[in-house]
Image: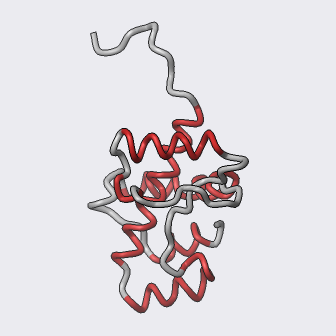
Amino acid sequence: MLFHEDEEPTPPKVTEVVNYLDMWRFIERSFHQLSDPDKQRLAEEAGVFGVDPKFRGFDGNNEGEYMNIARFMIEDLNRFAEFAERDLNSHFPMVSTYRRMFGLFEPMRRKIGHHATMNSLGVDDLIQLLKRS
């Protein structure tokens, strides 16, 4: 039997962090696939957050549990390896920002699929997401 009735469900914060890491995987990979003119447009329309967007982590003082979950996923489970070697302490609360962004991202992800290596967000999608950061 693959699943057991006594298995506990995934804690909500773990699901939330995985969703945010997945979203940022799409954002970063999509950014690198943009043409130079689209990167320029993104910078102009999304402001400072549109210039080489990167996952910033979580606030170590107020979002430590989120930061520890992300660190465990990245460093111990080797998921989201592209975020390894980064300082995951944003020094600024990010959860509410990521929640807003994810609310926009989820319908985009359904539209393009779940494989970040095969499908990417367009510049309009990135502008919309990064204006929320």
Snapshot quadrant of residue 37: bottom left
Lateral position of residue 52 relative to residue 118, left or right: right
Is 8 situated above or below 120? above
Q: Position of residue 86 (x, y in %)?
A: 46, 60
Q: Which residue is pictured at 50% across the width and 21% down the height? A: 9
Q: Which residue is pictured at 51% across the width and 88% down the height? A: 41
Q: Quadrant of the C terminus?
A: bottom right
Q: Nearer the viewer, residue 82 or 1?
A: 82
Q: Which residue is pictured at 55% across the width and 75% down the height? A: 127
Q: Position of residue 103 (x, y in %)?
A: 61, 53
Q: Which residue is pictured at 56% across the width and 28% down the height? A: 11
Q: How many marks?
A: 0
Q: Nearer the viewer, residue 93 or 28?
A: 93
Is 6 situated above or below 32? above
Q: Position of residue 51 (x, y in %)?
A: 52, 81
Is 42 situated above or below 128? below
> What is the image's colouring?
secondary structure
Q: Quadrant of the N terminus?
A: top left
